[in-house]
Amino acid sequence: MVKIPSLTSQSAIILLRIVTALIFVAHATVRIANSTIHQFADFLENEGFGFSLVVVWLITIYEIAGGLLLTAGIFSRWLAIGFIVIIAAGIVIIHAANGWFVGEHGTGGSEYSVLLICSLIVIAAADNEKH
């Protein structure tokens, strides 16, 4: 069996938590940097959501603040649950209609979102074991 030197299960969970958190921070930061907040809000408005601009800003703030807290391992279980809710809503509202594959075989499908949810479940479970 090949072992990665000095990488324990606990270290692997920490790595997963940090990388997952930084993905959320990057996702929200790019939304701000590329000025797509209003585009996302318009999409939600067309899907029948009221207060869509407020919703998009709340999601964006949660992704940045929650991502930074998750990176530090603060409130990991609770933040993971919030991220799962956001991602599950994204699957229902956006990604499911685009199929399963995200990249080469399709555009905007659910596979990446499902992987993030699984990562967040592992992060939440590991946090439960700490307490």
Image: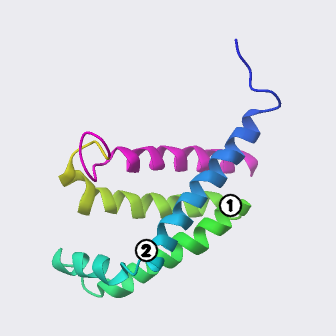
Report which residue position mark 2 lands on. 31
Q: Amino acid at mark 1?
A: Thr
User: Does 125 sit above or below residue 39?
Assistant: above
Q: Residue at x 47, y 78 (%)?
A: 33
Q: Quadrant of the N terminus?
A: top right
What label does residue 71 carry, if any? 1
Q: Is residue 28 left or right of residue 96?
A: right
In percent of the image, x 76 and y 41: which residue is there?
11
Q: Residue furthest right?
A: 6
Mark 1 residue element:
helix
Q: Position of residue 85 (x, y in %)?
A: 42, 62
Majority secondary structure of magenta residues: helix
Q: Secondary structure at mark 2?
A: helix
Residue at horizontal 68 percent and vertical 51 percent from the top: 127
Label number found at residue 10 = none
Q: Are marks 1 and 2 in contact (CB under 8 Å)?
A: no
Task: Find out whether residue 108 is within the magenta segment.
Answer: yes
Q: Residue lying furthest top in this view?
A: 1
Q: Quadrant of residue 2?
A: top right
- Percent across and percent down for residue 25 are 56, 67
Does 20 sit above or below residue 7? below
Mark pair 1, 2: CA separation: 20 Å
Q: Earlier in the sequence, mark 1 or mark 2?
A: 2
47 part of magenta stretch: no
Instruction: Categorize mark 1 by other alpha carbons within 10 Å: few (<14), some (14-19), many (20+).
Output: many
Chain part drawn in magenta:
103-131
Residue visible at 43% across and 82% down in the picture? 57
In the shown orientation, is residue 4 left or right of residue 43?
Answer: right
Quarter of the view holding residue 31? bottom left
x and y percentages locating residue 64 in the rendered image: 56, 72
Q: Is residue 55 above or below residue 115?
A: below
